[in-house]
Image: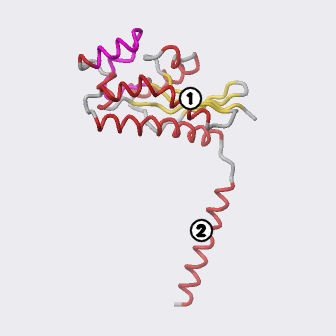
């Protein structure tokens, strides 16, 4: 019995020491980027779920996105270190003034689309791209059935009208379940 207690105590102590050592290890750039992506993705997803639960038609969720998604993105960015930022982008954007992709974004999204077509894609595939003194960390956003209420081909006429009114240049429809909807990108400058 004493040996078992001693062994259990030793294991617990070693486990606590290992956890403490891991806690003091600095994050890799990829881990840091994923942390910021989760901050933005989590904030947006929580709000979207709440609005979809209140109004399954999707109208309330669309109103939230129209009025608050960019505001939440800005708020999350104020919580990040000065050397980092996080944003969303896609090939087919709803808000061109905020979410238009650049050449690097397009290259990464093309690679995700090719992997989806080849059936080698994993939604956990985080891509890391270094450009000069900036490292970009990408997480794919895959279209789920609930996304199709505002991003599919067969939209409720009220949603279609609301999109047309809020985003006259909208291109973010016509998706199918499993399509690449876009990416969340964290950019971290060397510091």
> Which numbered disc, 2 or 1, marks the residue that appears first in the sequence?
2
In this rendered view, identify the residue nearer to me: 13 or 149: 149
Q: Residue at (49%, 14%) from the top-left corner?
A: 96
Q: Which residue is mark 1?
A: 74
In reply to whether residue 175 is colored magenta, the answer given is yes
The magenta segment: 159-181
Residue farthest along the bottom direction in this orientation: 1
Task: Give the percent coordinates (x, y) of residue 144.
Answer: 33, 32
In this rendered view, identify the residue nearer to me: 159 or 109: 159
Circle 1 residues within 10 Å: few <14, some 14–19, many ≥20: some
The residue mark sitting in front, 2 or 1, is 1
Q: Quick one: SS at disc 1?
A: helix
Please determine whether, in this image, residue 9 is positioned above or below residue 99.
below
Q: Residue at (54%, 27%) from the top-left corner?
A: 87
The answer for how far apart the CA atoms under marks 2 and 1 are is: 39 Å
Task: Give the percent coordinates (x, y) of residue 66.
Answer: 41, 22
Q: Residue at (60%, 43%) from the top-left corner?
A: 31
Q: Quadrant of residue 20?
A: bottom right
Task: Give the percent coordinates (x, y) of residue 50.
Answer: 35, 39
Q: Which residue is mark 2?
A: 15
Please determine whether, in this image, residue 62 is positioned above or below residue 79.
above
């Amino acid at each position: 019995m004493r040996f078992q207690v001693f062994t259990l105590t030793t294991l617990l102590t070693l486990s606590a020491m290992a956890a403490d050592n891991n806690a003091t290890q600095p994050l890799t750039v990829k881990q840091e980027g994923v942390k910021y992506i989760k901050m933005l993705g989590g904030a947006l997803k929580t709000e979207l779920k709440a609005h979809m639960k209140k109004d399954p038609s999707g109208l309330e969720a669309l109103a939230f996105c129209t009025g608050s998604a960019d505001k939440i993105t800005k708020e999350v960015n104020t919580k990040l270190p000065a050397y980092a930022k996080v944003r969303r982008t896609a090939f087919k954007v709803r808000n061109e003034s905020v979410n238009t992709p650049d050449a690097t974004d397009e290259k990464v999204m093309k690679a995700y689309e090719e992997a989806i077509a080849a059936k080698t894609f994993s939604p956990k595939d985080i891509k890391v791209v270094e450009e000069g003194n900036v490292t970009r960390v990408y997480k794919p956003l895959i279209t789920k059935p609930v996304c199709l209420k505002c991003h599919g081909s067969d939209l409720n006429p009220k949603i279609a009208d609301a999109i047309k009114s809020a985003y006259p240049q909208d291109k973010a429809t016509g998706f199918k379940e499993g399509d690449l909807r876009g990416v969340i990108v964290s950019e971290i400058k060397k510091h």
